[in-house]
Image (cartoon, rainbow, N blue to C red):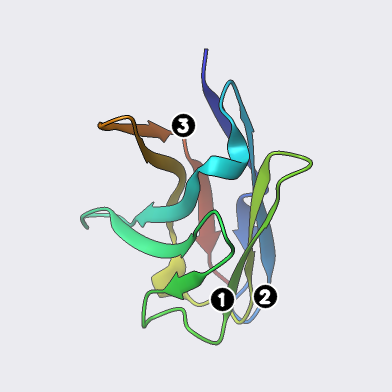
Amino acid sequence: QVLLVESGGGLVRPGGSLRLSCAASGITFGRYAMSWYRQGPGKERELVAKITSIGSTNYADSVKGRFTISRDNGKSTVYLQMNSLNSEDTAVYYCNAQWYGGGYEYDYWGQGTQVTVSS
């Protein structure tokens, strides 16, 4: 059974920081590209940041310079360090694991963690 379990969300004031974690089990973690998505109130789900199996990263323009994605393959965990948070960052944040192998796409999602930025 594949599980992606996010943690670290919560309420933070504008300008503050949070660190999200996503612990994976049931997959060969090092093979997978790991991503963070978010869905704000009344908005569609959007890609926030992605890190490939070899550590290449890319970010949404809205978070460049403020968010950092990283991974620890030994702990099967991906992180999202979020700094200088503002109200536009309020959303449910989802962890995603993706791998293409043997002609198949393997795609898994976590349950999400709420991030609320408010004074």
Q: Residue at x 59, y 31 (%)?
A: 28
What crowding class fits label 3: few (fewer than 14 Cα within 10 Å), some (14-19), or many (20 or more)? some
Badge 1 element:
loop
User: Pointer 1: what residue?
Assistant: 85
Q: Which of marks 2 and 3 is nearer the N terminus?
A: 2
Q: Which mark is residue 39?
A: none
Image-quadrant location for residue 49: bottom left
Q: Residue furthest right?
A: 74
Q: In this view, does 35 lie to the left or right of 23?
A: left
Q: What residue type is labelled 1?
A: Leu
**Above or below for 8 versus 60:** above
**Above or below for 69 versus 111:** below
Q: Where is residue 23 in the image (x, y as percent from the top left)?
A: 66, 36
Q: Position of residue 103 (x, y in %)?
A: 25, 32
Q: Is residue 89 left or right of residue 27?
A: left
Q: Which residue is drawn at 54% across and 42% down?
A: 31
Q: Quadrant of the C terminus?
A: bottom right
User: Pointer 3: what residue?
Assistant: 111
**Above or below for 34 versus 97:** below
Q: Which amino acid does label 3 sit on?
A: Gln
**Foreground tag (2 vs 3):** 3
Q: Which of 5 and 83 is in front in this view?
A: 5
Q: What residue type is labelled 2?
A: Gly
What crowding class fits label 1: few (fewer than 14 Cα within 10 Å), some (14-19), or many (20 or more)? many
Q: Which of 103 and 88 is in front in this view?
A: 103
Badge 2 element:
loop
User: Pointer 2: what residue?
Assistant: 16
**Above or below for 103 versus 57:** above
Q: Position of residue 85 (x, y in %)?
A: 56, 76
